[in-house]
Image: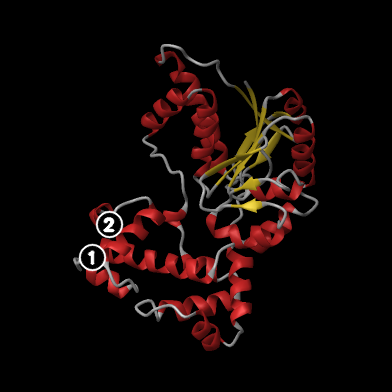
């Protein structure tokens, strides 16, 4: 498989190196398998011979025309954490060559993949319209608002839909590269993960900070503050809406539009977050913690924790 990895000015250094390192590691470890898959021929391409990364390092590249013969185009993330600046960049003239390359690559039927902020470049090029995708969990509200034609599931670490693969937050580049290896050889992907000491992370849910998501909208932020102060009580959406000065319907629509979920589900996220924190930092019995986060029975909390984090209460407490 010929893989073209795009380097461009402002590229996220760790994202670029993670993709290159994992694929190089897979090539180096192929011989340890009884039936090794073919090697990955990886080229770092760019629009100029030398590009400068987000951290200021200079990377030498091959001509971007190499992408025409590639079997896969990888687009690492942009080194930009500010949502407004990110959207301005991916929609501006500086990134136009990247958008055109991504669109032309998909028009030829060649798969493309990206992670974190790079998923905005894919979405801006139009190749994610009508497809499922994921992105960094903390950018999800901004992604969802700008790209309504994309079915976003920010809880996933890696998602593949009709030839386009996307991955989550910054170090999701490692998960993305391992997913590419896994498509050819699950055994080799497991071997590389063991050497790199990388655990399988199918979901971003355990890393999500609800308060960070709430900051993307004033109404949602007010609802989050109200909910946190009432976690021990039965949830009343009507009371919450009245307390923050909006209608119940407005609250429902705001949460759905911004987070792609319901107010009840969002409050459940807050309860899971608070319960997980108490398990890690206190010796309180589980039934006491359950009551502190609005559940009458400890078993209900056990079930919710397992469903939302993929881990048991005892594992969370051990951490």
Residue 218 percent coordinates (x, y): 59, 77
Given residues 302 and 94, the one toward you in this image is 302
Residue name at image x 70 percent, y 24 percent = 70
**Above or below 277: residue 45:** above
* Whether residue 21 is visible: yes
The N terminus, quarter of image: top right
- Badge 2 crowding class, 10 Å Cα cut-off, few under 14, some 14 to 19, many 20 or more, is many
Residue name at image x 57 percent, y 52 percent = 153
Marks 2/1 in contact by CB < 8 Å: the verdict is yes
Whichever of labels 2 and 1 marks the residue nearer the N terminus, that label is 1
Disc number at residue 263?
Answer: none
Q: Is label 1 in a helix, a strand or a loop?
A: helix
Q: Which residue is mark 1?
A: 286
Q: Is label 2 in a helix, a strand or a loop?
A: helix
Given residues 54 and 129, the one toward you in this image is 129
Residue at the outermost top position:
34
Residue 49 percent coordinates (x, y): 72, 32
Residue 11 percent coordinates (x, y): 63, 44
Q: Quadrant of residue 189?
A: top left
Q: Which residue is mark 2?
A: 313
């Amino acid at each position: 498989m010929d893989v073209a990895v795009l380097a461009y000015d402002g590229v996220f250094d760790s994202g670029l190196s993670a993709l290159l390192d994992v694929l190089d590691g897979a090539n180096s470890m192929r011989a340890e398998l009884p039936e090794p898959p073919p090697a990955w021929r990886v080229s770092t391409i760019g629009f100029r011979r030398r590009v400068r990364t987000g951290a200021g390092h200079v990377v030498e590249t091959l001509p971007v025309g190499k992408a025409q013969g590639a079997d896969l185009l990888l687009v690492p993330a942009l080194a930009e954490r500010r949502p407004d600046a990110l959207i301005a960049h991916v929609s501006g003239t500086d990134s136009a060559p990247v958008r055109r390359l991504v669109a032309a690559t998909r028009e030829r039927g060649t798969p493309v993949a990206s992670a974190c902020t790079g998923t905005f470049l894919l979405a801006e090029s139009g190749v994610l319209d009508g497809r499922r995708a994921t992105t960094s969990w903390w950018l999800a509200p901004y992604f969802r608002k700008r790209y309504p034609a994309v079915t976003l599931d920010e809880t996933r670490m890696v998602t593949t839909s009709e030839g386009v693969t996307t991955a989550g937050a910054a170090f999701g580049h490692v998960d993305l590269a391992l997913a590419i290896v896994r498509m050819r050889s699950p055994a080799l992907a497991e071997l590389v993960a063991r050497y790199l000491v990388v655990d399988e992370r199918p979901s971003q849910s355990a890393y999500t900070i609800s308060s960070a998501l709430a900051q993307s909208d004033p109404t949602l932020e007010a609802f989050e503050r109200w909910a946190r102060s009432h976690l021990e009580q039965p949830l009343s959406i009507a009371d919450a809406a009245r307390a923050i000065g909006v209608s119940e319907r407005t609250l429902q629509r705001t949460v759905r539009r911004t987070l792609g979920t319901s107010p009840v589900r969002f409050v459940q996220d807050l309860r899971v977050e608070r319960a997980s924190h108490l398990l890690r930092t206190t010796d309180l019995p589980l039934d006491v913690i359950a009551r502190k986060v609005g559940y009458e029975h400890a078993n209900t909390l056990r079930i919710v924790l397992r469903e939302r984090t993929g881990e048991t209460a005892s594992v969370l407490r051990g951490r």
